[in-house]
Image (tube, rainbow, N blue to C red):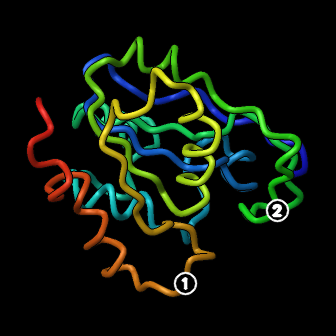
Amino acid sequence: MNNAKGFPPIASKDAKVLILGSMPGGQSLQAQQYYAHPRNAFWPIMADLYGFGVDAPYKKRLQSLMESKVALWDVLNACYRPGSLDTSIDEDSIVVNDFVAFYRQHSNIRAVFFNGVKAEQLYRRYVLSTPELVGKHVLQRLPSTSPANARLAFLAKLEQWRAICTGPRLKGVPD
């Protein structure tokens, strides 16, 4: 997968939390589903945190996130990337999603959680270059759920991902 084109956001109007990846991997792009790689820990973590079946149909999993006021998207709308690794993204080919418009439509979002280092780096570099977005949200990086991130076991990832529900950085964030 060389020229990668991302997906539209999954978000209800009353979403309070946004989870951002960088760009879907090859298997996700092929399946047209977020986090479709069978070894990606994203859906098992979300199932644990929000109480739905990890094997539920994709649309049901998305619905469960939206009912939990969790939005899902990627920083990039498009890029050139040979393979699926974030390290292969050609920086000169990056097209960033329109976060100004997204936040206007989803004004209840209070916290943004990054699925890995690259998503955070891209957001800080390209999205926070827009002055009206600086300081508007609590930002927190979480460990990548990608199978390429093998340095952390599933339970260690799950424990850190609990921050999207109960994390200390969310205390004091207005409902």
Disc 1 residue crowd, few under 14, some 14–19, many 20+, Cα 10 Å: few
Quadrant that contains the C terminus: top left
Q: Residue at x 36, y 58 (%)?
A: 54
| Rendered residue at 26%/33% (across/down) | 110
Pointers 2 and 1 in contact (C-beta within 8 Å): no
Give the number of the mark in front: 2 or 1: 2
- In-front residue for pair 114/162: 114
Q: Which residue is mark 2?
A: 88
State which quadrant residue 19 falls in: top left
Residue sitting at 53 percent across and 53 percent down? 120
- Figure check: 40 above or below 103: below
> Count of labels shown?
2
Residue in the image at 87% along x and 46% along y: 80
**Residue position marked by numbered label 1 in the rendering:** 150
Between 35 and 151, the one nearer to me in the picture: 151
Residue 30's x, y, as percent? 75, 47
Spot occupied by residue 33 in the image (x, y as percentages of width and height): 59, 43
Horizontal arrangement in the rendering, residue 91 relative to residue 23 (left or right): right
Q: Residue 85, position in %: x, y?
A: 74, 65
Amino acid on which the number 1 mark rests in the picture: Ala
The amino acid type found where label 2 is placed reads: Ser
Q: Which callout, 2 or 1, points at the residue further toward the start of the chain?
A: 2
